[in-house]
Image: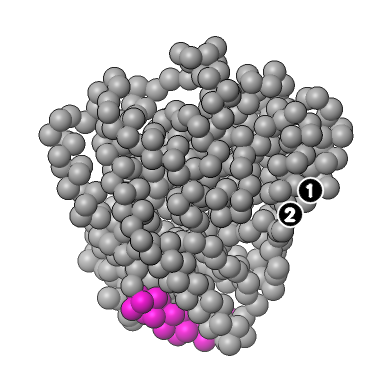
Amino acid sequence: MVNTTSLKTTKSEEIFVAAQKLMPGGVSSPVRAFKSVGGQPIVFDRVQGAYIWDVDGNQYIDYVGTWGPAICGHAHPDVIAALHKALDKGTSFGAPSVQENILAEMVIEAVPSIEMVRFVNSGTEACMSVLRLIRAFTGRDKIIKFEGCYHGHADMFLVKAGSGVATLGLPDSPGVPKTTTVNTLTAPYNDLEAVKTLFAQNPDEIAGVILEPVVGNAGFIVPEAGFLEGLRELTQENGSLLVFDEVMTGFRLAYGGAQERFGVTPDLTTLGKVIGGGLPVGAYGGRKDIMSMVAPAGPMYQAGTLSGNPLAMTAGIKTLELLQKPGTYEYLEKITKKLTEGLLDVAKAAGHQVCGGHLGAMFGLFFASGPVYNYEDAKKSDTTKFGRFHRRMLERGIYLAPSQFEAGFTSLAHTQEDIERTLNAAQVVLSSLS
C-alpha cells in the first residue's frame, strides 16, 4: 500500500501523453481527465476487490468503484466465474436469451415502481428513452429537471446538468440547439415551490418530472423531508409522470433503490451501473400501461443491437444474487457511515469547513460550511482545496472521485481495515492542508 507523499507515475504520464494525441483530452469520458483536481490521471492496470493497481505498480483503496457498479467489489470471483461460462456460448446474440428473462424478473421483484422493463446499454440511453416514453404517453412535450442532476449527455438533458459538466465548469453544451432544450424546464433541487410555479406557468403542458432521488452528480445531496412526496403529489395532480433516475442509487441505497428507502413510488425508473455487474448496461421500466407504449408492443420506437447482451445480463444476475445475501446492506451502511463520519470528524478537527453525508453505499464530502441542499449550495465549495486534498490522498494510496461534484461509493469488498487506513491517510493530509 502506498503510504508516502511521493507517487511514481512515469508510465501513467507516458500513456496519457500518447492518449491526448489519439482521443479528445486523452480520455473516453471527461471527468477521467483530472482537470478539476490537477495533475495527470493515473492509468489503471487491473482491479480486484476494493483495490486498484496502476501501470506503475501503485496500489490504491478505491472509492469510485467504476463509478458505482462495483458494489460487490471489483472482479468478484462469482461474477467472473459466471462470465467465463457465458463467454463459451458467445459474446452477443442480437436475439432473445433466457438471461434477459431472469434479470428482468429480479428487477421487477426488487424495484417497487417496475412492472415491465426494457434493457438498453447505458444510463444515458435509458434516460433518453424514458423521456421519449413520457412524452408519448402523455402527449405533452415539456419536462422538468433539476439543476445539477445529470441524466446522461442527450441534448435535452444538457441544461444546468451535473457530473462532468459541473466538474469542468462548462456552460450548456455547444452543439445543442435551443429548439431541443426549449421544452426542458429547470428548478433547484429540494425546492417544491419552484416546481409548483413551473406547473402553474405551463398548465397541461408538462409530460413529467425527472430527478436523481438522491443527487450523486453534483456531489452527494439528499432530499429534504417531504420533497419526494411533494413531487409525487404534484405530478399526480397535474396529470404528469414522475421519473426517478436510479442509475446511480438503484440497488445501492437499498435493494429496491431510493424508492424503497424513502417509500415514494414513481411512475417510471431508469437503472444502470449495478444491474450490469460492471458491464455496460442500462434499463428503464415502470407501470405496465406506460411500458406497453414501447415498440413492438406499442408505437413508441426504441431499439438497440446490443440491448440485453448475454454477458451483461449474466453479470447482473450474479451481482443481484450476491446482494440478496443476509446482512449485505447492513454491512454497507456500517462501513459507509464509519468512513463518512470519520472523514468529517478528521476534517473538522483540523480546522476545515466541511459537510457531507451518506446513505447505503454512497457518500459525499464538501469543503463548505453547508448545509448543501442543491447545486447552488454545492458550487460554494472550495474546489481548489478539494483538488489538493484529492492529490495528496492519491499519493497515500486512496483513490477518490476526481471531482468535488461526484459522489463516492463503498463496496462489500471494503474492510474495516481499509476504512481505518483511509481515515489515517486523511488525518495526515488534512492536518497539513491549507
Please state which of residues 123 and 310 is positioned toward the viewer in this rendering: 310
Q: Is residue 122 visible?
A: no
Identify the residue at image location x=72%, y=52%: 227
Mostly what secondary structure, the magenta segment?
A: helix
Q: Badges 1 and 2: C-beta atoms under 8 Å apart?
A: yes
Q: Which residue is disc 2 drawn over?
A: 226
Marks 1 and 2, how far apart in space? 9 Å
Instruction: Label 2, secondary structure: give it.
Output: loop
Which image quadrant for residue 364?
Answer: bottom right
What residue is disc 1 on?
A: 192
Instruction: Give x and y (percent) for residue 257.
Output: 51, 50
Which is more toward the observer, 189 or 352?
189
- Tell me which residue sits at (84%, 27%) in the image: 203
Residue at point 63% right, 72% down?
A: 355
Residue 108 x/y as whole percent: 45, 37
User: Of residues 307 and 153, which is closer to you in this image?
Assistant: 307
Per the rendered image, the range of residues in magenta is: 416-434
Task: State whether residue 179 is above or below residue 84.
Answer: above
| Discs 1/2, front | 2
Quadrant in which the N terminus appears? bottom left
| Amino acid under disc 2 | Gly
Rendering colour mode? one colour
Task: Give the left or right position of residue 329, taking residue 418 as reference.
Answer: right
Q: Amino acid at mark 1?
A: Leu
74 in relation to 350, above or below: above
How many numbered circles does the render carry? 2
Q: Nearer the viewer, residue 333 or 39?
A: 333
Q: Is residue 424 magenta?
A: yes
Quarter of the figure that contains the C terminus = bottom right
